Amino acid sequence: MKWNRKFNYPFLNRSAVNGSRHYIVNQHRLPSVSTILSLTKTEEEKAGLASWKARIGEKAAQQITTSAAANGTKMHSILESYLRGRENLELLDFEEENDLAQKMADLIVAEGINGKLDEIHGVECNLFYDDSKGFAGTADLIATYESQLSICDFKQKNSIMKESYSSFHTYMLQLSAYSLCHDKIFGSTITQGVILLATKDLVFQIFRINHEKLKEYQQKFLDRVDQYYSLINK
């Protein structure tokens, strides 16, 4: 696992517009990929979220969401440190001996990173698609992953993910959006998107999207971009 800094990733400032994350690119405020996907949720996604909240209650749903976000942030921080070579995961000293975020990060490193990353090109990379209907975001990892130039994202979930879940399709749309940005900025050809996921029960999952399927999701995301701009320009 070695670094190859052949891509010069930009640093983008962030700002909030009506409470939603935007990135400042050439004095324009471009909506984040997550902002676009949030505003253009399908009716099925909205119904599923409402049903879950109704089933467990608003307060419990908020607690679960907040806890998962905090754990995910910590897990990402550990993985970022590992990839940048700032620390050795085996030597990290956390307040809790059996820290869940550390265990989940360890699992992703062992099952999804070690022996699979040919080259690291960037970690926490700001990317943008500067266009009349532009967008921007931050990819967890851009690497040559098992010989393919790839966008990689780290995910944590409370339980295993299935390809039928709406969250799976959201993740695929995120990867496709980042690949569009990367190809536009650098003239690259991203051929693969990879999700490396750990559950709180320490189950590892890997999901890939490539070739024609990646192109399909790129178009699906661009359709969501059109929908987003139609909504905000009403």
Image (tube, rainbow, N blue to C red):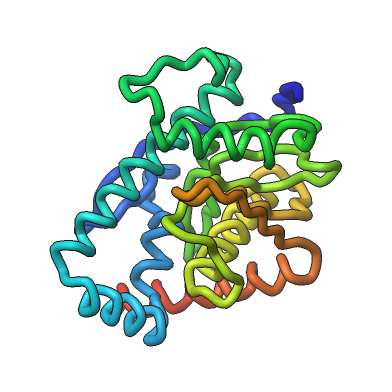
Tally of marks: 0
**Quadrant housing residue 231:** bottom left
Q: Position of residue 147 (x, y in %)?
A: 85, 42
Q: Is residue 45 above or below residue 39?
A: below
Residue at 70% across, 30% down? 120
**Quadrant housing residue 3:** top right
In this orientation, does residue 219 appear? yes
Q: Position of residue 78 (x, y in %)?
A: 48, 28
Residue at 44% across, 48% down? 200
Residue toward you, 13 or 71: 71
In this orientation, does residue 155 appear? no
Q: Position of residue 150 (x, y in %)?
A: 72, 47
Q: Is residue 187 left or right of residue 182?
A: right
Residue toward you, 214 or 69: 69
Which quadrant does the N terminus fall into? top right
**Quadrant housing residue 52:** bottom left
Residue found farthest to the left: 59
Q: Is residue 148 above or below residue 78?
A: below
Q: Is residue 211 above or below residue 19?
A: below
Q: Is residue 79 above or below residue 153?
A: above
Which quadrant does the C terminus fall into? bottom left
Q: Position of residue 152 (x, y in %)?
A: 63, 46
Residue at 65% across, 39% down? 142
